[in-house]
Amino acid sequence: MFEEAQYFAPVAAQQDGSVVVELSASHPGFADPVYRARRNAIAGLAVNYRPGTPIPAAEYTEQEHEVWALVTRELAVKHAKYATAEYLDGVDRLGLPQERIPQLEEVSRLLEPLTGFRYLPAAGLVPLRDFYGVLADGYFHSTQYIRHHSVPFYTPEPDVIHEVIGHANALASSRYAALYRLAGQAARRVQSDEALEFVSKVFWFTLEFGVMREAGELKAYGAGILSSYGEIEEFRGMDIRPLDLSAMGTTHYDITKYQDVLFRADSLQHLEDVVGDFWDTCDDDSIAKLIAAAV
Ligand code: NLE
Ligand code: FE2
């Protein structure tokens, strides 16, 4: 029903307690039995996770750590050019490891003292109401597997690089973290699926793929741009539109490609005033009016 459903490989629990991840034939890991076994083992950690216990450590391979190190190196250069100052400040404050994949439990330990956010393991798609709702309590659902080593610069399917480099560095900023919490409160407040989809699309065009003006330049603060060293080179050439709630909440997007429509805030304050205030106050009625006002 929602676009998000397309890019998460379905996860099936087997009778013997093991877990099988169904990769599509177009997935770069489809024909790689080693990768598929890793995906199944890591998904099993999340499926069997009990809330309130520490997140089980994934035993990553050398090759997987190398993908993290490569992407971290490439992104550091691009972030210096294209990320907002507030995000770069988050990178400094969080201090993620550069040469190896951090465990999600370790990400929580780094993040919680900064903004109170903690990570939860997700095997794949988390229903929208849960995924967004728990943001209000300072929890972020995260995949634990890493993208296939043959395509390090981009994945349509969120992986640990996207969740941690893209989102945790943003969640290390108290101003961005406050926006994530407000999105969670909005998701809990709205009743209808239409209103929830609208809230999630505003999240998509802001905290996932938002760009903003900063000192006369266009910078990215959205996690989906900031975790792809392919896409981050392209976003300035896309169709950049002014921040507009009706448009963001109703514009269609295709998760499988670089995003060709992006919405630009004039500043972080502008984002807080428009989108933060929307999430803080929206309900089914106000969202119905915004949908009706969309052209
Ligand atoms: N395209 C992003 C990346 O390659 O890191 C992930 C986006 C997930 C919504
Ligand atoms: Fe994301």
Image (cartoon, grey):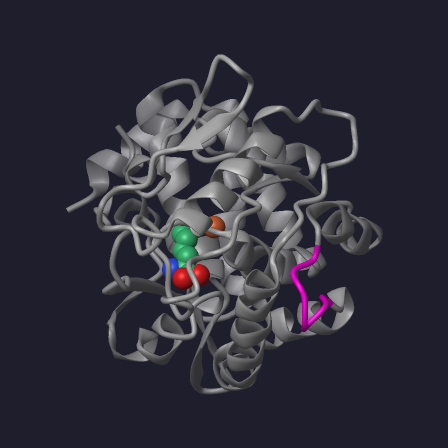
| Extreme residue toward the right, this view | 113
Q: Is residue 95 above or below residue 190?
A: below
| Residue 49 visible in image | yes
Is residue 148 highlighted in magenta? Answer: no
Percent of width and height locating residue 35 = 44, 50
Q: Foreground: 113 or 107?
A: 107
Q: Residue at x 63, y 54 (%)?
A: 60
**Magenta span: chief secondary structure:** loop
* 274 w.r.t. 66: above or below: above
Residue 193 falls in which quadrant of the image?
A: top left
Q: Quadrant of residue 266?
A: bottom left
Task: Indicate left or right for 178 with 155 as reference.
Answer: right
Q: Which residues are magenta?
A: 96-102
What is the quadrant of residue 89 in the picture?
bottom right
User: In the shown orientation, is residue 250 left or right of residue 54?
Assistant: left
Q: Quadrant of the N terminus?
A: top left
Could you tell me residue 113's position as x and y percent?
Answer: 84, 52
Total numbered labels placed on residues in the image: 0
Q: Residue at x 55, y 37 (%)?
A: 41
Q: Is residue 103 left or right of residue 85?
A: right
Question: Which of these two is toward me, 11 or 250?
Answer: 11
